[in-house]
Image (spheres, coloured by chain):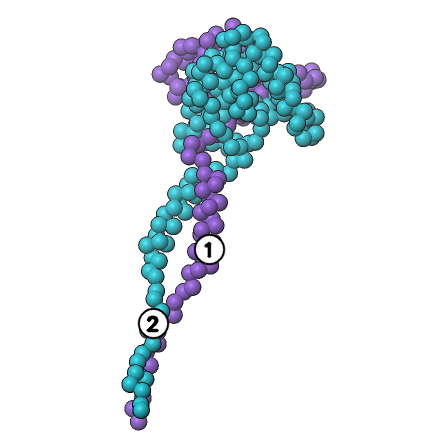
Chain colours: A cyan, B purple
Amino acid sequence: MKKRFNNRRKPEPLEVDITSLLDILVIMLVFLLMNYNASDLQLDLVKGVEMADSESTHITHYAPVIQLNGEQTIYLDMQEISRMPAGEAPALAALETALSERHKLLPEKEQKSEAGALINLVFDRGTDYQQIEKIMASSAKVGFTQFKFIVRGEH
Amino acid sequence: MRKRHVMKKPEKINLVPIMDAVFIFIFFLLMSAQFVNVYEIGSSVPMVREMREDKMKKDPLNLVIEVHATEVVVRRGIASEKVGAFGDNDWDKLRSTLAGLKAKHPDERVAQLRPQGKVPFHRLVKVIDHAKENKGAKMFEEIVFDGKGAM
């Protein structure tokens, strides 16, 4: 007997329409490219720090980060070191001890650099220069003399 | 004999490799995205350097920017002569004055910052911004805190 369904056409493989998916991916790609930051510094802000706005467009670089928040608590690489209102001299002494320990961990080339080692400083926008100067002086004492103020870009 | 025309199916582009690349790219960008734009402002403390007298310039700019709580005073020269004082509404004037000084001394790159008394950080940043650039042109890129402020 002749097969009845011999002439039946093979069903075409199902095709998924990926146009809309591609649209979303392209939009995401453009959005992420706009927010791409080539900096090697991963900055996490401590509580109580409101950054100052700046026109600067210089990208940040990896280095130890000192943060001073509105309550004048000093942090080094996210670890609380001391509180300035509790007594400035012991607070700065604790910072210097922590910084000198951190300085020992730097690569030898950076430790012996004539220009001094790099340090990132994050201050609350309302911080007085008096406090800033003291922290800069403590950093400079242990060899961190290249200060980089971390600010929020206005662009 | 009548020729039988076979309809050619349009060729389809293979999007699989490009999709792979885009996915990898998206993950990479997601991991490195920073949604707060953070930048840096460089500064340093003064260094003591030995300098031979014959290398001293005849008329050094010796730019000093005094930052007070309500105004900014620009001084120049060895005698620290006052160039001008600028209030909180005179930021553009401050920038154009500094641009004028830079035009007269194109080789000068250093500005000494002298905060006087209680000056908040955001004010210092604003002064540094105005000293460093003018409409994209670089002015005084090296900002040095001279530490002679009245504390």
Q: Nearer the viewer, mark 1 or mark 2?
A: 2
> Which residue sits at x=42%, y=21%?
A50
> Residue lying furthest bottom in this view?
B1
Please state the horizontal and vertical placement of residue A134, each as a whole percent of the image: 56, 12
Mark 1 to mark 2 CA distance (whole Å): 25 Å
Q: Is residue B120 left or right of A140 when viewed as pictured?
A: left
Does residue A64 lie above or below A128 as drawn?
below
Residue A15 image-quadrant placement: bottom left
**Quarter containing the N terminus of chain B:** bottom left
Please state the horizontal and vertical placement of residue B42, each as a whole percent of the image: 54, 25
- For the residue labelled by badge 1, is the local secondary structure a helix, a strand or a loop? helix
Please state the horizontal and vertical placement of residue B120, each as a whole percent of the image: 44, 14
Q: Which residue is mark 2?
A: A12
Residue A114 image-quadrant placement: top right
> Residue lying furthest top in this view?
B150
Does residue B124 lie above or below A25 as drawn?
above
Decide: few, some or many residues near mark 2? Use Cα within 10 Å; few <14, some 14-19, many ≥20.
few
The chain carrying label 1 is: B
> Which residue sits at x=47%, y=26%?
A45
Task: Tell me which amino acid carries mark 2.
Answer: Glu
Decide: few, some or many residues near mark 1? Use Cα within 10 Å; few <14, some 14-19, many ≥20.
few
Please state the horizontal and vertical placement of residue A80, each as a whole percent of the image: 53, 19
The chain carrying label 2 is: A
Same-chain check, marks 1 and 2: no
- Picture disc at residue B20: 1
User: Between residues A61 and A8, which one lies in front from this camera angle?
Assistant: A8
